[in-house]
Image (tube, grey):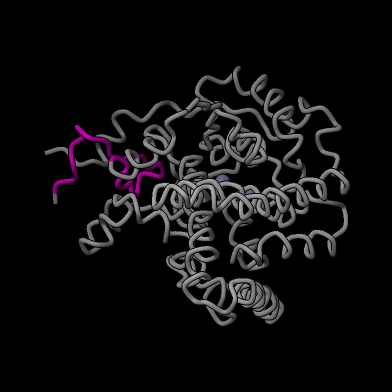
Amino acid sequence: MVSSTTLLKQDTKKPQKLPSIEEIKAAIPAHCFEKSLPKSLFFLVLDYVILYGCYLVLPYFEAYGWAGYITWCWVIGMFAASLFCIGHDCGHTTFSNYEWVNDLCGHIAHAPIMAPYWPWQKTHRQHHQYTSHITKDKGHPWVTEEDYEGKNFLEKHFAKFPISGLLRWNPIYTFLGLPDGSHFWPFSDLFTTTTERIKCAVSASAVFFCMGVAFYFCDYSITKWFWYYYMPCLWQGLWLVVITYMQHSHPEIEVYEDSQWNYMKGQVQTVDRTYGFGVDTLLHHITDGHVAHHMFFTRIPHYNLMEATEAIKGVLDQYPGAYRHETNYHVWFKYLWYNVRLEYLIGKGSGVLRYKLIGQEKKLH
Ligand SMILES: [Zn+2]
Ligand SMILES: [Zn+2]
């Protein structure tokens, strides 16, 4: 009888040699670390103009019935995800050198798409600080074989239903707080200080205010509000789920327990993916510049990510397997396939966990 843990140990590679963060930083041109408020504001305004344009062209899409409407949701969801990336920069303080500007613009970018700015800033920071740590990596719940066995049928297979992605960000993650805690409720497990609770109340109120403004623009019609405001927000959430899931999911990635985890090992588990068709540029390179973003999340603004990526590649390529990049024109299908294939991680207790893949023997109890 062979347990999955033993299997894992048998094919565990030798400890990978990695460069230090200082070595990588030294290779990146100094101007990549410069934050430009005018540039950041330009992209914030640009995304708003594009979103406004999406509403102007809505009738042309609706002329094609449901197919047209769903296509429109897919398009506006993507541009709303672009706007989300601007707020993401604000949360990382890469929008500008002024904290109050970052926080104000962060709320301007996030509140209208139902993202509570300060609470998510906190959980997202933990994701960067503890990337690929089995318990401390927030926002990307790692599921072990043991966790998986304890779930009911719906919990085990929910992510495999393509439509589930629409609900995973909002309301499941941010509102209901599964699994990290609600980002809307000041007394949820996420917050430990009074300041954090007040910040949660402010950010949540900003979202509710924007929901009200949208209701006004929908002529106080719940139906209009649902189809033309809430649904685009759900599609933005779906884009976000696809983007973040695909950056941290790969059959070969490793997840670490405390004994084996360190910052650099965690960061190189990130995958850069090129979606193609101009999407990467429209999404501010959150897709194909994510490794660079992950390593220097408080230092490099989105418009410098690709130049930094080239420099990082130059260093990481000297360490076999340290830089992962894929071109995925079919990223949506790959996302669906990974949700079916990468069910849970095996190797609990060994320090290093990997996905159990089809063909690998399951743990025998
Ligand atoms: Zn990430
Ligand atoms: Zn980030």
Residue lying farthest left?
1
Which span is picked out in magenta? 341-364
Q: Where does the image place residue 215, in percent across and percent down from the top left?
A: 59, 75
Q: Is residue 97 above or below residue 342?
A: below
Residue 362's quadrant in the figure? top left
Q: In the image, what residue occupies the spot 33% across and 53% down?
A: 159
Q: In the image, what residue occupies the spot 35% across and 40% down?
A: 338
Q: Where does the image place residue 87, in percent across and percent down from the top left?
A: 70, 55
Q: Is residue 231 above or below residue 1?
A: below
Instruction: Tell me: 55 left or right of 141.
Output: right
Q: Is residue 285 above or below residue 145?
A: above
Figure quadrant of the N terminus: top left
Examine the rendering and report whether any part of residue 255 can be seen: yes
Q: In the image, what residue occupies the spot 68% across and 74% down?
A: 206
Residue 299's quadrant in the figure? top right
Instruction: Tell me: 83 left or right of 127.
Output: right
Examine the rendering and report whether any part of residue 133 can be seen: no
Instruction: Tell me: 25 left or right of 81.
Output: right
Instruction: Tell me: 159 left or right of 85.
Output: left
Q: Where does the image place residue 213, in percent across and percent down from the top left?
A: 66, 74
> In this figure, what is the number of numbered marks?
0
Residue 306's quadrant in the figure? top right
- Residue 337 is one of the magenta-drawn residues: no
Q: Where does the image place residue 361, in percent across and percent down from the top left?
A: 18, 37
Q: In the image, what residue occupies the spot 68% across and 48% down?
A: 50
